[in-house]
Image: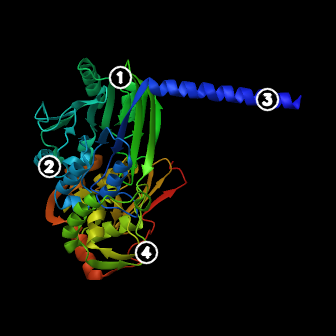
Amino acid sequence: MLQKSKKFFLWTGGAFAALYLAWNGQFYSTTFPVTIVHTNDLHGNILPFRGKGGAATIAAFLKKQKKVDLLLDAGDFFQGTPESDLSGGKNTVIVMNELKYDAATIGNHEFDFGLAALEKLSGIATFPFLSANVNYNKKPLVFAKPYIIREVRQANIGILGLTTELTPRTSVPENMKGLEFLSSVETARNIIPEMKNLGADVIIALTHLGFEESTETWPGDRLLAQSVEGIDIIIGGHSHRRVEGFRSGKTLIVQTSGRGSSVGKMTVYLDRKTKKIRRIKNKIVEMDVKKIGEDDGIKKIVSEISEEISKSLSEVIAVSEVDLNRRRGGDSNLGNFLADIMRQYSKTDAAFHNAGGIRTDLKKGDISLRDIYTLNPFDNTIVTMKLTGEQVHKLIELSINNEYGLLQVSGMRITYDKGANILEITINEKPLNEKKLYSVATNSFLASGGDNFGIFKEGKNVTDTGKLFRDVIIEHLKKTKTITKQSARVDGRILIESRIKD
């Protein structure tokens, strides 16, 4: 009996295997693959960082693939490293040309150098800039395409570009003059039928919207997928979040964690007759330099760029006794340290710095000019003004509830409860007087209403010092030489208490 059972299981196992092979063979004989490699939020990282990423590693990965039909980027490709920033983004675009990108969506940080600079970069790029929902003076951007339709193998792939409509909140208001960021949802609804009428078999939304929330307060990829029919794939950016494959209805959403430390590899299997999607495989691949290697040609180009920049940035200007870490949900030793430098330079009662403007942590040890440029890549100046105690109180209320993170402060102590009720504010160790005028310092981004802190625009005696905050940090470090445990610490200036306000 046992022998018969063994024969039965062997027979059924073999039958199932034969059926699977037959089905699998039929699937591959009736479909064809389209391979897409995607990146997002490169932020100028053409060099490896901590053993990952870099353009040469991405190039080596691309060469190891049998076939890459499309190479796409979902925005914020420059702004964030000296190699990119000191060339106004040009170096990043040159490297992307060499990698042979097929398209890139305009992200919010693409506006950091101004619209004219972005238009100039579009002329250097050998790939199209995409954005369907940005207007200038009531007209679509002349240098960007709303979408492209590419013939890939036997199918037409439509690629729609969308930029976050929240860009004015996260960019310097001066750069936003004349620009209008339309609803990504409404724009997609209007354009997708047009793309299909032009023969697009597959619709890819290449977005810089963010994955975080599907609400009107943050209209991101999930809201887009839920609200718009006909999008097959969303390749997203902006929130730097690893999304290997999130299914929302009929739409697949993907995103990498950004900075080129990983890329997405997607294989879309299309029916040979109908050109409809039969299956999608997507995986996030870590760009480990040791495992993948580096392409010699791209490495040479990047090395030449780096050598030119490094001549002025390799100088060690200070030594830190501690790891310097940022934090959005409270005060941090790095945030406190920077806010203190701003207040000391300005000789004001208090100073405010946005948490999102601190772009990296710094390790204990040598601090170079490169580190400071990476830490603070934005050309923000220090601005001083007078605010009433009442306005300061409103700022703190906004800070506690702000989606971009708490303001980093100096000269102040703030206590609030878990219900976001303010319990106490002191300035210079004295209780806040709502009738009193206080001198405050901040950066030009916040002073112009960035991150929704419009109260700064109500300040009196506003003075833009014209001094880049980055240069003030550098001067401070060159003078002090050492970042001590005492000068960079969390000292309880922002506290959450469990007691509930009556």
Alpha-carbon distance for marks 2 and 4? 37 Å
Q: Earlier in the sequence, mark 4 or mark 1?
A: 1
**Residue at the spot of label 2:** 114
Asked whether the beta carbons under mark 2 and mark 3 sit within 8 Å of each other, the answer is: no
Nearest-to-viewer mark from 4 and 1: 1
Alpha-carbon distance for marks 2 and 3? 74 Å
> How dense is the environment of label 3, judged by Cα within 10 Å: few (below 14), some, or many (20 and up)?
few
Q: Position of residue 407 (x, y in %)?
A: 35, 56
Front residue of 175 and 369: 369
Residue that appears at 49% across and 57% down: 496
Alpha-carbon distance for marks 4 and 1? 52 Å
**Residue at the spot of label 4:** 322
Q: Secondary structure at mark 1?
A: loop
Front residue of 308 and 501: 308
> How dense is the environment of label 4, judged by Cα within 10 Å: few (below 14), some, or many (20 and up)?
some
**Residue at the spot of label 1:** 230
